[in-house]
Image (cartoon, coloured by chain):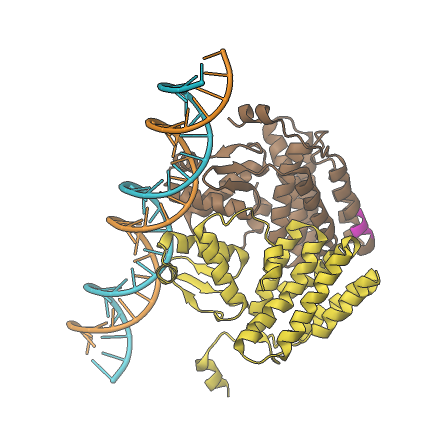
Chain colours: A brown, B yellow, C cyan, D orange
Amino acid sequence: MNSTADALQTNDSAETGAQQIRDAIREAIVERRLSPGTKLSESDVGNLFKVSRTLARAALQALSYEGLVRVEKNRGAFVAYPSPDEARQIFAARRLVEPGILSEAAKRITPSQVQHLKQLLLEEGRLMSERGQSARRAEIKASGDFHLMLASISGNLIMQRFMEELVARSSLVIALYGQSSASSCGHAEHGDIIAAIERRDIETACHLMLHHISHIEGDLDLRERKSFGLKEAFER
Amino acid sequence: MNSTADALQTNDSAETGAQQIRDAIREAIVERRLSPGTKLSESDVGNLFKVSRTLARAALQALSYEGLVRVEKNRGAFVAYPSPDEARQIFAARRLVEPGILSEAAKRITPSQVQHLKQLLLEEGRLMSERGQSARRAEIKASGDFHLMLASISGNLIMQRFMEELVARSSLVIALYGQSSASSCGHAEHGDIIAAIERRDIETACHLMLHHISHIEGDLDLRERKSFGLKEAFER
DNA sequence: GTGCACTAAATCGTATACAATCACGCCTGG
DNA sequence: CCAGGCGTGATTGTATACGATTTAGTGCAC
Protein backbone atom coordinates (compact mmCIF):
# COMPACT_ATOMS: atom_id res chain seq x y z
CA MET A 1 0.00 0.00 0.00
CA ASN A 2 2.46 2.53 1.20
CA SER A 3 5.10 1.04 -1.02
CA THR A 4 6.69 4.22 -2.25
CA ALA A 5 6.26 6.12 0.95
CA ASP A 6 8.22 3.43 2.67
CA ALA A 7 10.78 3.27 -0.06
CA LEU A 8 11.34 6.97 0.25
CA GLN A 9 12.05 6.78 3.94
CA THR A 10 15.40 8.34 4.71
CA ASN A 11 15.33 8.47 8.49
CA ASP A 12 16.70 5.58 10.42
CA SER A 13 13.98 5.45 13.02
CA ALA A 14 10.63 6.88 14.03
CA GLU A 15 12.60 9.29 16.17
CA THR A 16 10.08 11.26 18.09
CA GLY A 17 6.34 11.38 18.49
CA ALA A 18 6.11 14.79 16.89
CA GLN A 19 7.32 13.25 13.64
CA GLN A 20 4.42 10.84 13.55
CA ILE A 21 1.93 13.60 14.18
CA ARG A 22 3.54 15.73 11.50
CA ASP A 23 3.33 12.88 9.03
CA ALA A 24 -0.27 12.16 9.91
CA ILE A 25 -1.33 15.77 9.43
CA ARG A 26 0.68 16.09 6.25
CA GLU A 27 -0.98 13.03 4.83
CA ALA A 28 -4.37 14.45 5.74
CA ILE A 29 -3.52 17.70 3.99
CA VAL A 30 -2.09 16.06 0.90
CA GLU A 31 -5.06 13.73 0.60
CA ARG A 32 -7.32 16.75 1.04
CA ARG A 33 -9.11 15.56 4.10
CA LEU A 34 -8.08 18.91 5.57
CA SER A 35 -9.12 21.91 3.53
CA PRO A 36 -6.92 24.95 3.06
CA GLY A 37 -7.63 27.54 5.70
CA THR A 38 -8.74 25.06 8.35
CA LYS A 39 -7.61 26.11 11.77
CA LEU A 40 -5.24 23.74 13.52
CA SER A 41 -5.27 24.72 17.15
CA GLU A 42 -2.41 23.37 19.20
CA SER A 43 -4.75 22.14 21.90
CA ASP A 44 -7.06 20.46 19.43
CA VAL A 45 -4.23 18.71 17.66
CA GLY A 46 -2.79 17.64 20.99
CA ASN A 47 -6.08 16.25 22.22
CA LEU A 48 -6.71 14.52 18.92
CA PHE A 49 -3.42 12.64 19.05
CA LYS A 50 -3.48 12.26 22.83
CA VAL A 51 -0.28 14.17 23.40
CA SER A 52 0.61 17.43 25.02
CA ARG A 53 0.57 20.77 23.31
CA THR A 54 4.34 20.65 23.17
CA LEU A 55 4.38 17.89 20.59
CA ALA A 56 1.43 19.30 18.71
CA ARG A 57 3.22 22.60 18.46
CA ALA A 58 6.41 20.95 17.24
CA ALA A 59 4.50 19.11 14.53
CA LEU A 60 2.77 22.28 13.34
CA GLN A 61 6.05 24.14 13.37
CA ALA A 62 7.60 21.45 11.19
CA LEU A 63 4.72 21.62 8.75
CA SER A 64 5.12 25.35 8.55
CA TYR A 65 8.72 24.83 7.38
CA GLU A 66 7.36 22.70 4.59
CA GLY A 67 4.88 25.35 3.60
CA LEU A 68 1.85 23.20 4.29
CA VAL A 69 0.77 25.14 7.35
CA ARG A 70 0.83 28.82 8.04
CA VAL A 71 1.35 29.92 11.60
CA GLU A 72 0.34 33.46 12.49
CA LYS A 73 1.84 34.99 15.55
CA ASN A 74 -0.45 34.78 18.56
CA ARG A 75 -3.27 33.67 16.30
CA GLY A 76 -2.67 30.04 15.54
CA ALA A 77 -1.87 27.60 12.78
CA PHE A 78 -3.93 27.10 9.64
CA VAL A 79 -3.71 24.75 6.72
CA ALA A 80 -1.90 26.79 4.10
CA TYR A 81 -4.04 28.76 1.71
CA PRO A 82 -1.68 29.38 -1.20
CA SER A 83 -2.28 32.53 -3.16
CA PRO A 84 -2.46 32.34 -6.94
CA ASP A 85 1.00 33.83 -7.03
CA GLU A 86 2.33 31.19 -4.69
CA ALA A 87 0.69 28.57 -6.86
CA ARG A 88 2.46 29.89 -9.92
CA GLN A 89 5.76 29.87 -8.09
CA ILE A 90 5.27 26.29 -7.02
CA PHE A 91 4.73 25.18 -10.58
CA ALA A 92 7.53 27.37 -11.84
CA ALA A 93 9.79 25.63 -9.36
CA ARG A 94 8.64 22.25 -10.59
CA ARG A 95 9.26 23.20 -14.21
CA LEU A 96 12.69 24.32 -13.15
CA VAL A 97 13.78 21.22 -11.27
CA GLU A 98 11.86 18.27 -12.63
CA PRO A 99 13.55 18.07 -16.02
CA GLY A 100 16.90 18.00 -14.27
CA ILE A 101 15.76 15.35 -11.84
CA LEU A 102 14.25 13.28 -14.60
CA SER A 103 17.40 13.57 -16.66
CA GLU A 104 19.53 12.37 -13.79
CA ALA A 105 17.09 9.60 -12.94
CA ALA A 106 17.03 8.38 -16.54
CA LYS A 107 20.79 8.11 -16.53
CA ARG A 108 20.95 6.01 -13.38
CA ILE A 109 17.79 3.96 -13.62
CA THR A 110 18.04 0.18 -13.39
CA PRO A 111 15.71 -2.32 -15.04
CA SER A 112 14.20 -3.23 -11.69
CA GLN A 113 13.46 0.42 -11.03
CA VAL A 114 11.79 0.72 -14.40
CA GLN A 115 9.66 -2.19 -13.36
CA HIS A 116 8.83 -0.49 -10.10
CA LEU A 117 7.76 2.64 -11.97
CA LYS A 118 5.52 0.64 -14.23
CA GLN A 119 3.99 -1.06 -11.26
CA LEU A 120 3.26 2.33 -9.77
CA LEU A 121 1.61 3.36 -13.00
CA LEU A 122 -0.55 0.27 -12.99
CA GLU A 123 -1.66 0.92 -9.44
CA GLU A 124 -2.48 4.46 -10.42
CA GLY A 125 -4.60 3.28 -13.29
CA ARG A 126 -6.40 0.79 -11.11
CA LEU A 127 -7.29 3.48 -8.58
CA MET A 128 -8.51 5.74 -11.36
CA SER A 129 -11.13 3.24 -12.35
CA GLU A 130 -12.36 2.72 -8.81
CA ARG A 131 -15.12 4.73 -7.24
CA GLY A 132 -15.31 6.31 -3.84
CA GLN A 133 -13.55 8.90 -1.77
CA SER A 134 -10.96 6.50 -0.51
CA ALA A 135 -9.87 5.53 -4.00
CA ARG A 136 -9.74 9.16 -5.02
CA ARG A 137 -7.41 9.97 -2.16
CA ALA A 138 -5.17 7.07 -2.91
CA GLU A 139 -5.14 8.17 -6.52
CA ILE A 140 -3.98 11.65 -5.58
CA LYS A 141 -1.21 10.13 -3.56
CA ALA A 142 -0.19 7.72 -6.28
CA SER A 143 -0.07 10.49 -8.83
CA GLY A 144 2.41 12.39 -6.70
CA ASP A 145 4.38 9.27 -5.91
CA PHE A 146 5.32 8.93 -9.55
CA HIS A 147 7.23 12.20 -9.42
CA LEU A 148 8.65 11.35 -6.01
CA MET A 149 9.87 8.01 -7.25
CA LEU A 150 11.75 9.69 -10.06
CA ALA A 151 13.41 11.97 -7.52
CA SER A 152 14.30 8.95 -5.46
CA ILE A 153 15.85 7.24 -8.47
CA SER A 154 17.91 10.31 -9.23
CA GLY A 155 19.83 9.45 -6.08
CA ASN A 156 19.91 12.99 -4.73
CA LEU A 157 18.36 13.10 -1.29
CA ILE A 158 18.28 16.88 -1.26
CA MET A 159 16.33 17.13 -4.47
CA GLN A 160 14.13 14.32 -3.28
CA ARG A 161 13.15 16.20 -0.15
CA PHE A 162 12.56 19.34 -2.17
CA MET A 163 10.30 17.46 -4.53
CA GLU A 164 8.35 16.05 -1.61
CA GLU A 165 7.66 19.58 -0.52
CA LEU A 166 6.70 20.69 -4.00
CA VAL A 167 4.39 17.75 -4.62
CA ALA A 168 2.66 18.23 -1.28
CA ARG A 169 2.13 21.91 -1.90
CA SER A 170 0.92 21.18 -5.40
CA SER A 171 -1.80 19.06 -3.92
CA LEU A 172 -2.94 22.02 -1.87
CA VAL A 173 -2.96 24.23 -4.93
CA ILE A 174 -4.97 21.75 -6.93
CA ALA A 175 -7.42 21.39 -4.08
CA LEU A 176 -7.92 25.14 -4.12
CA TYR A 177 -7.84 26.03 -7.78
CA GLY A 178 -8.41 22.79 -9.67
CA GLN A 179 -11.34 22.91 -12.07
CA SER A 180 -11.92 19.51 -13.55
CA SER A 181 -11.46 16.64 -11.17
CA ALA A 182 -8.46 15.95 -13.29
CA SER A 183 -5.98 15.72 -10.49
CA SER A 184 -4.40 12.73 -12.10
CA CYS A 185 -5.49 13.41 -15.62
CA GLY A 186 -1.85 13.10 -16.50
CA HIS A 187 -1.93 9.36 -16.08
CA ALA A 188 -1.29 8.75 -19.74
CA GLU A 189 1.49 11.30 -19.69
CA HIS A 190 3.18 9.42 -16.88
CA GLY A 191 3.13 6.37 -19.10
CA ASP A 192 4.63 8.27 -22.00
CA ILE A 193 7.42 9.54 -19.81
CA ILE A 194 8.26 6.04 -18.63
CA ALA A 195 8.32 4.85 -22.22
CA ALA A 196 10.73 7.63 -23.16
CA ILE A 197 12.95 6.79 -20.21
CA GLU A 198 12.95 3.15 -21.16
CA ARG A 199 14.29 3.85 -24.61
CA ARG A 200 16.81 6.24 -23.10
CA ASP A 201 15.34 9.20 -24.94
CA ILE A 202 16.08 11.74 -22.24
CA GLU A 203 15.39 14.71 -24.47
CA THR A 204 11.85 13.61 -25.17
CA ALA A 205 11.28 12.54 -21.59
CA CYS A 206 12.13 16.02 -20.33
CA HIS A 207 9.97 17.59 -22.95
CA LEU A 208 7.08 15.37 -21.94
CA MET A 209 7.63 16.22 -18.30
CA LEU A 210 7.47 19.94 -18.97
CA HIS A 211 4.34 19.43 -20.98
CA HIS A 212 2.88 17.34 -18.21
CA ILE A 213 3.49 20.00 -15.56
CA SER A 214 2.08 22.73 -17.75
CA HIS A 215 -0.90 20.53 -18.38
CA ILE A 216 -1.63 20.24 -14.68
CA GLU A 217 -1.14 23.95 -14.16
CA GLY A 218 -3.33 24.70 -17.14
CA ASP A 219 -6.23 23.02 -15.43
CA LEU A 220 -6.13 25.55 -12.63
CA ASP A 221 -8.27 28.63 -12.33
CA LEU A 222 -5.76 30.90 -10.68
CA ARG A 223 -8.08 33.64 -9.60
CA GLU A 224 -8.00 35.40 -6.28
CA ARG A 225 -10.87 34.10 -4.24
CA LYS A 226 -10.83 35.97 -1.03
CA SER A 227 -14.46 36.05 -0.06
CA PHE A 228 -13.86 37.54 3.33
CA GLY A 229 -17.07 37.21 5.28
CA LEU A 230 -17.78 33.89 3.72
CA LYS A 231 -14.39 32.59 4.54
CA GLU A 232 -14.85 33.10 8.23
CA ALA A 233 -17.90 30.93 8.26
CA PHE A 234 -15.82 28.42 6.36
CA GLU A 235 -13.07 28.76 8.88
CA ARG A 236 -15.05 26.65 11.27
CA MET B 1 25.90 46.10 5.96
CA ASN B 2 23.19 43.52 5.93
CA SER B 3 21.76 44.95 2.76
CA THR B 4 21.01 41.70 1.02
CA ALA B 5 19.98 39.85 4.11
CA ASP B 6 17.38 42.50 4.69
CA ALA B 7 16.33 42.53 1.09
CA LEU B 8 15.80 38.81 1.25
CA GLN B 9 13.48 39.04 4.24
CA THR B 10 10.21 37.38 3.47
CA ASN B 11 8.57 37.25 6.88
CA ASP B 12 6.47 40.13 7.99
CA SER B 13 7.78 40.28 11.52
CA ALA B 14 10.37 38.86 13.88
CA GLU B 15 7.67 36.46 15.01
CA THR B 16 9.12 34.54 17.89
CA GLY B 17 12.30 34.42 19.90
CA ALA B 18 13.24 31.01 18.57
CA GLN B 19 13.59 32.55 15.11
CA GLN B 20 16.23 34.97 16.34
CA ILE B 21 18.21 32.20 17.97
CA ARG B 22 17.96 30.09 14.86
CA ASP B 23 19.24 32.96 12.74
CA ALA B 24 22.07 33.68 15.13
CA ILE B 25 23.24 30.07 15.15
CA ARG B 26 22.85 29.76 11.40
CA GLU B 27 24.96 32.82 10.86
CA ALA B 28 27.60 31.41 13.16
CA ILE B 29 27.62 28.17 11.21
CA VAL B 30 27.71 29.81 7.81
CA GLU B 31 30.51 32.14 8.86
CA ARG B 32 32.34 29.13 10.25
CA ARG B 33 32.58 30.30 13.78
CA LEU B 34 31.01 26.95 14.63
CA SER B 35 32.86 23.96 13.24
CA PRO B 36 31.11 20.91 11.85
CA GLY B 37 30.58 18.32 14.54
CA THR B 38 30.39 20.82 17.39
CA LYS B 39 27.87 19.75 19.98
CA LEU B 40 24.96 22.07 20.50
CA SER B 41 23.38 21.06 23.75
CA GLU B 42 19.90 22.38 24.33
CA SER B 43 20.81 23.58 27.81
CA ASP B 44 23.97 25.30 26.63
CA VAL B 45 22.20 27.07 23.79
CA GLY B 46 19.43 28.11 26.15
CA ASN B 47 21.83 29.48 28.71
CA LEU B 48 23.86 31.25 26.06
CA PHE B 49 20.85 33.10 24.73
CA LYS B 50 19.24 33.48 28.12
CA VAL B 51 16.12 31.56 27.20
CA SER B 52 14.62 28.28 28.26
CA ARG B 53 15.44 24.96 26.73
CA THR B 54 12.10 25.07 24.94
CA LEU B 55 13.19 27.85 22.62
CA ALA B 56 16.67 26.46 22.22
CA ARG B 57 15.17 23.17 21.17
CA ALA B 58 12.85 24.84 18.68
CA ALA B 59 15.76 26.68 17.12
CA LEU B 60 17.84 23.52 16.81
CA GLN B 61 14.89 21.69 15.38
CA ALA B 62 14.48 24.37 12.73
CA LEU B 63 18.16 24.21 11.85
CA SER B 64 17.91 20.47 11.53
CA TYR B 65 15.18 20.94 8.97
CA GLU B 66 17.56 23.14 6.97
CA GLY B 67 20.26 20.50 7.14
CA LEU B 68 22.68 22.65 9.10
CA VAL B 69 22.30 20.70 12.31
CA ARG B 70 21.96 17.00 12.89
CA VAL B 71 19.93 15.90 15.87
CA GLU B 72 20.43 12.38 17.11
CA LYS B 73 17.73 10.86 19.20
CA ASN B 74 18.47 11.06 22.91
CA ARG B 75 22.00 12.15 22.12
CA GLY B 76 21.84 15.76 21.18
CA ALA B 77 22.30 18.22 18.34
CA PHE B 78 25.52 18.75 16.43
CA VAL B 79 26.61 21.09 13.71
CA ALA B 80 26.15 19.05 10.56
CA TYR B 81 29.12 17.09 9.35
CA PRO B 82 28.26 16.48 5.70
CA SER B 83 29.67 13.33 4.21
CA PRO B 84 31.50 13.51 0.88
CA ASP B 85 28.44 12.04 -0.72
CA GLU B 86 26.20 14.68 0.81
CA ALA B 87 28.64 17.30 -0.41
CA ARG B 88 28.40 15.99 -3.95
CA GLN B 89 24.62 16.00 -3.73
CA ILE B 90 24.60 19.59 -2.57
CA PHE B 91 26.65 20.72 -5.51
CA ALA B 92 24.70 18.51 -7.88
CA ALA B 93 21.57 20.25 -6.66
CA ARG B 94 23.13 23.64 -7.24
CA ARG B 95 24.16 22.69 -10.76
CA LEU B 96 20.63 21.55 -11.31
CA VAL B 97 18.81 24.65 -10.10
CA GLU B 98 21.14 27.60 -10.46
CA PRO B 99 21.11 27.81 -14.25
CA GLY B 100 17.34 27.89 -14.17
CA ILE B 101 17.28 30.53 -11.48
CA LEU B 102 19.85 32.61 -13.28
CA SER B 103 17.94 32.31 -16.51
CA GLU B 104 14.76 33.51 -14.87
CA ALA B 105 16.56 36.28 -13.04
CA ALA B 106 18.20 37.51 -16.23
CA LYS B 107 14.82 37.78 -17.88
CA ARG B 108 13.30 39.87 -15.12
CA ILE B 109 16.24 41.92 -13.95
CA THR B 110 15.92 45.70 -13.83
CA PRO B 111 18.75 48.22 -14.29
CA SER B 112 18.63 49.11 -10.62
CA GLN B 113 19.00 45.47 -9.70
CA VAL B 114 22.00 45.17 -12.01
CA GLN B 115 23.45 48.08 -10.13
CA HIS B 116 22.76 46.36 -6.85
CA LEU B 117 24.53 43.23 -8.05
CA LYS B 118 27.56 45.24 -9.10
CA GLN B 119 27.63 46.93 -5.76
CA LEU B 120 27.64 43.54 -4.10
CA LEU B 121 30.53 42.51 -6.30
CA LEU B 122 32.49 45.59 -5.32
CA GLU B 123 31.91 44.93 -1.66
CA GLU B 124 33.07 41.38 -2.19
CA GLY B 125 36.25 42.58 -3.84
CA ARG B 126 36.91 45.04 -1.07
CA LEU B 127 36.60 42.35 1.57
CA MET B 128 38.91 40.09 -0.39
CA SER B 129 41.72 42.59 -0.12
CA GLU B 130 41.25 43.07 3.59
CA ARG B 131 43.01 41.05 6.23
CA GLY B 132 41.71 39.46 9.37
CA GLN B 133 39.21 36.87 10.43
CA SER B 134 36.34 39.29 10.45
CA ALA B 135 36.87 40.27 6.83
CA ARG B 136 37.22 36.63 5.85
CA ARG B 137 33.87 35.86 7.41
CA ALA B 138 32.19 38.78 5.75
CA GLU B 139 33.73 37.66 2.48
CA ILE B 140 32.28 34.20 2.82
CA LYS B 141 28.90 35.70 3.44
CA ALA B 142 29.18 38.14 0.54
CA SER B 143 30.18 35.37 -1.81
CA GLY B 144 27.02 33.48 -1.00
CA ASP B 145 24.91 36.61 -1.13
CA PHE B 146 25.66 36.94 -4.82
CA HIS B 147 23.88 33.69 -5.54
CA LEU B 148 21.11 34.53 -3.11
CA MET B 149 20.57 37.88 -4.75
CA LEU B 150 20.09 36.19 -8.10
CA ALA B 151 17.50 33.91 -6.56
CA SER B 152 15.79 36.93 -5.09
CA ILE B 153 15.71 38.65 -8.47
CA SER B 154 14.21 35.56 -10.05
CA GLY B 155 11.09 36.42 -8.08
CA ASN B 156 10.42 32.90 -6.91
CA LEU B 157 10.30 32.78 -3.13
CA ILE B 158 10.36 28.99 -3.08
CA MET B 159 13.53 28.75 -5.11
CA GLN B 160 14.99 31.55 -3.05
CA ARG B 161 14.49 29.67 0.18
CA PHE B 162 15.90 26.53 -1.39
CA MET B 163 18.97 28.43 -2.51
CA GLU B 164 19.44 29.82 0.98
CA GLU B 165 19.58 26.28 2.25
CA LEU B 166 22.00 25.17 -0.47
CA VAL B 167 24.32 28.11 0.01
CA ALA B 168 24.42 27.63 3.76
CA ARG B 169 25.15 23.96 3.42
CA SER B 170 27.79 24.69 0.81
CA SER B 171 29.57 26.81 3.35
CA LEU B 172 29.71 23.84 5.68
CA VAL B 173 31.07 21.63 2.93
CA ILE B 174 33.77 24.11 2.03
CA ALA B 175 34.72 24.46 5.67
CA LEU B 176 35.18 20.71 5.84
CA TYR B 177 36.72 19.83 2.52
CA GLY B 178 38.07 23.07 1.07
CA GLN B 179 41.75 22.93 0.22
CA SER B 180 42.95 26.32 -0.88
CA SER B 181 41.51 29.21 1.05
CA ALA B 182 39.71 29.85 -2.18
CA SER B 183 36.25 30.08 -0.70
CA SER B 184 35.52 33.08 -2.87
CA CYS B 185 38.05 32.44 -5.55
CA GLY B 186 35.16 32.78 -7.91
CA HIS B 187 35.05 36.50 -7.50
CA ALA B 188 36.07 37.12 -11.08
CA GLU B 189 33.55 34.56 -12.25
CA HIS B 190 30.82 36.45 -10.47
CA GLY B 191 31.83 39.50 -12.45
CA ASP B 192 31.76 37.60 -15.70
CA ILE B 193 28.28 36.34 -14.95
CA ILE B 194 27.02 39.83 -14.25
CA ALA B 195 28.52 41.02 -17.51
CA ALA B 196 26.78 38.25 -19.41
CA ILE B 197 23.50 39.10 -17.74
CA GLU B 198 23.91 42.73 -18.60
CA ARG B 199 24.23 42.04 -22.28
CA ARG B 200 21.31 39.62 -22.04
CA ASP B 201 23.43 36.69 -23.04
CA ILE B 202 21.59 34.14 -20.97
CA GLU B 203 23.18 31.18 -22.65
CA THR B 204 26.66 32.28 -21.74
CA ALA B 205 25.61 33.34 -18.27
CA CYS B 206 24.28 29.88 -17.52
CA HIS B 207 27.38 28.29 -18.91
CA LEU B 208 29.52 30.51 -16.74
CA MET B 209 27.44 29.67 -13.72
CA LEU B 210 27.87 25.94 -14.24
CA HIS B 211 31.57 26.45 -14.68
CA HIS B 212 31.65 28.54 -11.54
CA ILE B 213 29.96 25.88 -9.43
CA SER B 214 32.19 23.16 -10.79
CA HIS B 215 35.15 25.35 -10.05
CA ILE B 216 34.17 25.63 -6.41
CA GLU B 217 33.50 21.92 -6.17
CA GLY B 218 36.77 21.17 -7.88
CA ASP B 219 38.64 22.85 -5.07
CA LEU B 220 37.32 20.31 -2.59
CA ASP B 221 39.11 17.22 -1.39
CA LEU B 222 36.13 14.96 -1.02
CA ARG B 223 37.72 12.23 0.98
CA GLU B 224 36.13 10.47 3.88
CA ARG B 225 37.68 11.76 7.06
CA LYS B 226 35.53 10.24 9.68
CA SER B 227 38.08 8.50 11.79
CA PHE B 228 40.00 11.02 13.76
CA GLY B 229 43.52 10.86 15.08
CA LEU B 230 43.19 7.18 15.77
CA LYS B 231 43.12 5.87 12.27
CA GLU B 232 45.26 8.57 10.72
CA ALA B 233 48.16 7.73 12.95
CA PHE B 234 47.65 4.10 12.09
CA GLU B 235 47.46 4.72 8.36
CA ARG B 236 50.63 6.70 8.17
C1' DG C 1 45.44 -6.83 35.29
C1' DT C 2 41.36 -7.38 32.57
C1' DG C 3 36.55 -7.59 31.72
C1' DC C 4 31.96 -7.04 33.07
C1' DA C 5 28.16 -5.13 35.54
C1' DC C 6 26.18 -1.70 37.99
C1' DT C 7 25.55 2.98 39.48
C1' DA C 8 25.42 7.91 38.76
C1' DA C 9 25.59 12.04 36.07
C1' DA C 10 24.12 14.34 32.15
C1' DT C 11 21.02 15.09 28.40
C1' DC C 12 17.03 14.56 25.86
C1' DG C 13 11.65 13.63 25.45
C1' DT C 14 7.34 15.00 27.09
C1' DA C 15 4.03 17.07 30.10
C1' DT C 16 2.31 20.67 32.83
C1' DA C 17 2.10 25.48 34.51
C1' DC C 18 2.25 30.31 34.08
C1' DA C 19 2.42 34.73 31.40
C1' DA C 20 1.33 37.49 27.36
C1' DT C 21 -1.46 38.53 23.60
C1' DC C 22 -5.53 38.70 20.86
C1' DA C 23 -10.62 38.16 19.70
C1' DC C 24 -15.07 38.93 20.95
C1' DG C 25 -18.86 40.64 23.45
C1' DC C 26 -20.77 43.70 26.82
C1' DC C 27 -21.55 47.93 28.69
C1' DT C 28 -21.76 52.77 28.75
C1' DG C 29 -22.28 57.27 26.67
C1' DG C 30 -23.95 59.91 23.02
C1' DC D 1 -30.08 53.00 18.05
C1' DC D 2 -25.16 53.21 17.19
C1' DA D 3 -20.17 53.87 18.31
C1' DG D 4 -16.36 53.12 21.01
C1' DG D 5 -13.82 51.57 25.09
C1' DC D 6 -13.11 47.97 28.39
C1' DG D 7 -13.24 43.41 30.46
C1' DT D 8 -13.36 38.47 29.91
C1' DG D 9 -12.31 34.18 27.66
C1' DA D 10 -9.56 31.69 24.63
C1' DT D 11 -5.25 30.75 22.43
C1' DT D 12 -0.54 31.14 21.84
C1' DG D 13 4.45 32.12 23.86
C1' DT D 14 7.67 30.68 27.22
C1' DA D 15 9.37 28.50 31.32
C1' DT D 16 9.82 24.85 34.53
C1' DA D 17 9.32 20.05 36.14
C1' DC D 18 9.51 15.21 35.75
C1' DG D 19 10.52 10.77 33.48
C1' DA D 20 13.39 8.11 30.03
C1' DT D 21 17.57 7.11 27.75
C1' DT D 22 22.30 7.28 27.05
C1' DT D 23 27.14 7.65 28.57
C1' DA D 24 30.86 7.37 31.46
C1' DG D 25 33.04 6.01 35.53
C1' DT D 26 33.83 2.89 39.29
C1' DG D 27 34.21 -1.24 41.73
C1' DC D 28 34.01 -6.09 42.00
C1' DA D 29 34.92 -10.69 40.43
C1' DC D 30 37.87 -13.60 37.98
Q: Is residue A91 above or below residue B187?
A: above
Q: How many marks?
A: 0
> Magenta segment: does it hold A205?
yes
Identify the residue shown where x is 75% and y is 56%.
B105
Task: Please report the residue visible at 67 percent of the width from the left and 34 percent of the height from the top.
Answer: A126
The answer to whether B163 is drawn above or below residue B125 in the figure is: above
Considering depth in this image, is B108 or A65 the residue closer to the camera? B108
Is B228 left, or right, of C15 in this rendering? right
Residue lying at the far bottom in this picture: please name it.
B236
Q: Quadrant of residue B200?
A: bottom right
**Residue at image location 58% in from the left, 30% down from the top:** A134
Inspect this view and state whether residue A176 appears: yes
The one nearer the camera, D13 or B6, is B6
Q: Look at the image and give the residue range highlighted in magenta.
A: A204-208
Residue B215 pos. (x, y %): 70, 73
Q: Nearer the viewer, residue B184 or B219?
A: B184
| Image side of residue A183 versus residue B83, left or right | right
